């Protein structure tokens, strides 16, 4: 038979159709979740520093400030030293320009297990924040999972900073007995404490799981909470319909509280929190379930419920959240930074992302930063010096600092 252009094309289409089923893969599963491939995981963090060109034509240098196992969050004391909490349940102080963390006594007992990134893991200490009037009352807040029988229970407590330790630590909030999970927090501009409620059941109004809560600094319920007069709801609830919240941050000019939220395989969200609003989980999602099908069943959707301001599919395991207001990195002033623990369900692909919004907080650009370092970027904070500080949450974790490349 003489081969014409037409028959060649037809044969090609037939081959494509026949091969379609074989082009798919059956991957190993564990508890209904694909076992992640580890070929690019476990890249040791080099000594550094590392210099980068960036999109806005501002060269940066990334310094390895200190090595700490599994740092989860950091915050700055007025003396410019840093408090760091770890998933092992440790509290450290890192003096300015020091690379040697000092153990701080007085925090609560905590429990952790498993590996970060694996399902079924528990974190010990998760977040640390200073009271808005820290200068006068010295109160340090820690969110953590405490042993509860053979299980765990999430809690937030506070203690007084003595200058070298924490004293008089006691809880201001506890999850229901047996309910553990990730609790992140931030103080609002009005002095109330926002926290993620640990655990799931995001549409059940009688429990804190899958909600963002709002409390007074002593744990009591603010009288203007959206469900403060509800007979059946947990009166601490501020917003509902969340999957895992990994960071809360206050917008520097509007004072609104923003949240980063993890979808499963895609559908990570950046949300602007409005009191009483429902953010849709698990009814809607822009992501897929871990085995592959869309979360919603037939297609990605976020109809009816409060939509995210930005979203990620595939997931980047969006984590720390910061609005950059500093002068030290001038080309980034006004930008939003988020940490990423891993991209597209592949361990070893964490990084930092920069999002550029217009004056209506509509997204214009995204820049992926520090990709080649392969770090789980858990927390992102602006330092009092205007530099950007990162906590990379893994066994060979570190505190990183981003400075202009030209600085000494
Ligand atoms: Ca949502």
Image (cartoon, grey):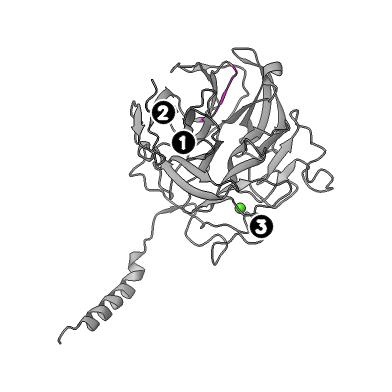
120 shown above or below 109: below
Residue 351 at what x, y percent from top left?
A: 43, 40
Residue bearing the label numbered 1:
331
Q: Which mark is residue 404?
A: 2
Name the residue located 56 percent from the left edge and 36 percent from the top edge.
323
Spatial separation of the CA atoms under disc 2 and disc 1? 10 Å
Name the residue located 33 percent from the left edge and 44 percent from the top edge.
39
Residue 115 at what x, y percent from top left?
A: 47, 37
User: Which residue appears farthest toward the left when viewing the image?
Assistant: 2
Residue 218, quarter of picture: top right
90 shown above or below 23: above
Mark found first going from the N terminus, 2 or 1: 1
Residue bearing the label numbered 3:
305
Discs 2/3, front: 2
Q: Which residues are magenta?
A: 72-78
Mark found first going from the N terminus, 2 or 3: 3
Q: Quick check: is the Cβ at mark 3 less than 8 Å away from ligand 1?
A: yes
Residue 231 at what x, y percent from top left?
A: 84, 48
Whether the magenta-drawn stretch holds residue 181 is answered as: no
């Amino acid at each position: 038979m003489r081969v014409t252009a037409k028959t060649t094309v037809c044969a090609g289409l037939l081959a494509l159709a026949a091969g379609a089923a074989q082009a798919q893969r059956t991957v190993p599963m564990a508890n209904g979740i694909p076992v992640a491939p580890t070929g690019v995981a476990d890249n040791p963090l080099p000594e550094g520093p590392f210099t980068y060109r960036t999109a806005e034509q501002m060269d940066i240098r990334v310094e390895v400030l200190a090595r700490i196992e599994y740092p989860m969050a950091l915050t700055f004391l007025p003396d410019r030293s840093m408090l760091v909490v770890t998933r092992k349940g440790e509290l450290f102080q890192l003096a300015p320009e020091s690379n040697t963390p000092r153990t701080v006594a007085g925090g609560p007992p905590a429990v952790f297990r498993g590996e970060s990134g694996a399902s079924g893991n528990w974190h010990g200490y998760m977040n640390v924040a200073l009271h808005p009037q820290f200068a006068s009352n010295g109160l340090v807040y820690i969110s953590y999972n405490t042993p509860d029988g053979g299980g765990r229970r999430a809690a937030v407590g506070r203690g007084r900073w003595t200058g070298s330790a924490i004293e008089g630590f006691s809880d201001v909030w506890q999850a229901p007995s047996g309910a553990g999970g990730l609790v992140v927090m931030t103080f609002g501009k009005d002095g109330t404490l926002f926290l993620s409620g640990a655990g799931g059941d995001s549409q059940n109004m009688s429990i804190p799981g899958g909600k963002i809560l709002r409390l007074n600094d002593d744990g009591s319920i603010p009288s203007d909470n959206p469900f403060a007069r509800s007979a059946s709801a947990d009166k601490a609830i501020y917003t509902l319909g969340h999957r895992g919240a990994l960071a809360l941050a206050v917008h520097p000019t509007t004072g609104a509280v923003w949240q980063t939220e993890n979808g499963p395989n895609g559908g990570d969200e950046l949300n602007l929190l409005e009191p009483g609003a429902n953010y849709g989980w698990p009814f809607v999602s822009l992501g897929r379930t871990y085995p592959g099908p869309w979360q919603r069943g037939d297609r990605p959707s976020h109809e009816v419920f409060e939509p995210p301001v930005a979203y990620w599919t595939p997931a980047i395991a969006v984590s720390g959240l910061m609005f950059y207001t500093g002068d030290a990195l001038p080309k980034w002033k006004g930008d939003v930074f988020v940490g990423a623990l891993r991209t597209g369900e592949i361990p070893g692909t964490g990084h930092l992302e920069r999002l550029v919004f217009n004056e209506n907080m509509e997204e214009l650009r995204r820049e992926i930063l520090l990709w080649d370092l392969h770090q789980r970027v858990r927390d992102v904070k602006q330092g009092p010096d205007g530099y950007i500080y990162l906590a990379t949450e893994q066994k060979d974790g570190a505190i990183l600092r981003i400075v202009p490349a030209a600085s000494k």
